[in-house]
Image (cartoon, rainbow, N blue to C red):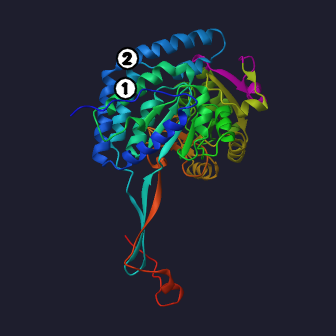
Amino acid sequence: MSQPSIAPLESSAASVVSIAERARAASRAVARLSVEARNQVLLAAAQAIESNARRILEANGRDCRAAEDLVAAGKMTSAMLARLRVTERGVEQMARQVREVASLPDPLGRRLAATELDTGLVLVKESCPLGVVGVIFESRPDVVPQLASLGLKSGNAVIMKGGSEAAATTEALVAIWRESLGKFPDVPADSVTLLQTRADVLDLLAQDQNVDLIIPRGSYELVQYVMRNSRIPVLGHGEGICHVYVDRAADMDKAVAISYDAKVQYPAVCNAAETLLIHEAIAREFLPQIVAKLKGAGVEIRGCAKTLAFLPGQGIIPATDKDWRTEYSALILSIKLVVNLEEAIDHINRNGSHHTDAIVTEDSQAAAKFLNEVDSAGVFQNASTRFADGFRYGFGAEVGISNGKLHARGPMGLEGLTTYKYKLYGNGQVVADYVSGKKHFTHRPLQ
């Protein structure tokens, strides 16, 4: 069987409407595929990523060399460069995540509820795709296979716009994905599309007839820009002002390990800790330990007045009110001493971004209060905030992280890319019979 031709990666101000229309048609085709067919496509795409590792790394090398010049000129942060860089292990991770998505249960056609309205009249609530999802992201090219795999598995088409700093890498990854679709005549190449220019973004945001959801992944400014300029529902990928609170009943070894991991393991991501809160009762013992370990890793410490008093002459920078509300995405950590658990919870709810916050404690009552009262998408006991991730949650990958409370919250995987519809199965029933009293509803829940 001859392979269908693959449409080129095109975009211009005039063609975005056409791209969105083709994505709409592609989404309907993908939604009709069986789960076996979708999984087969995903496994082929994972193999294509591995087979084209050199092509991906060469493209990323071009992006990184240009980015290094920008960092040297002070026009790009080292954190952004870190998110941009792809290694051989990173390519392997991309393929592994696609296979993880293929191994997940089918998110479509799930019966969420069933109710007998009357004898022979049954209402079923069933999961279905959103349709077309537009994602605007910065820096991280590994987002491409995550978006493409989650979109395909959930029966959606995806329109992407990556940052200019990762243009070569994202274009290579999308091209590889679309080439792999050429082996499957029933899967339109337009189920995955990459926009090319910044001007295309505004045109995409105007496609409320063909795009069902926009997900901006990046800075606070990017999210706000998208929200202001589109009538399409927006699920903002939230900034990460995450906290670790070390309680008076904390195990010191756990507290050091968790605080260090949450900041140092990968500081450039949104689930890294930005503020460390410490109960005053253990400050004399814990503060010197954690500061020494953090400074050994090159972390800049910004401390409250009490922290400075405990550790004079340690090179700690006085923290300002702005520090408590800053996502550093770098080896910088603010430290604040609190008098009790209540002050820690209040500080997090006032200054945090409702992303992920952790308590280190052996006191189960303190942990329960923290987990119940901290208003964040993720609340952890005795674990690093870095676990807030779709792959680590077992979602296979994530399309973004939502700090909001509507539709999806926290790492957004397959379930976040589905909605539901009501299917009513009848046998000639009409509303007039129920209005007149001739018939009566039973409203009986069904298994």
Contact (Cβ within 8 Å) of mark 2 with mark 1: yes
User: Residue at the spot x=36%, y=25% of the render?
Assistant: 92
**Mark 2 or mark 1: which comes first in sequence?**
2
Q: Is residue 267 above or below residue 426?
A: above
Q: Which mark is residue 176?
A: 1
- Residue located farthest toward the left when viewing the structure as drawn: 1
Residue 414, horizontal then vertical, whole percent? 43, 46
Q: Give the distance between the C-alpha atoms of the residues marked 2 and 1, in whole angstroms.
A: 9 Å
User: Residue at the spot x=77%, y=26% of the render?
Assistant: 309
Residue 14 showing in the rendered view: yes
Q: Which mark is residue 367?
A: none
Instruction: Check disc 2 and report the residue beneath it.
Output: 55
Give amino acid for label 1. Answer: Ile
Using the image as rendered, state which of residue 245 and residue 127 is in the foreground. Answer: 127
* Count of numbered circles on the image: 2
Image: magenta residue range: 295-315
Residue 150, horizontal then vertical, whole percent? 42, 40
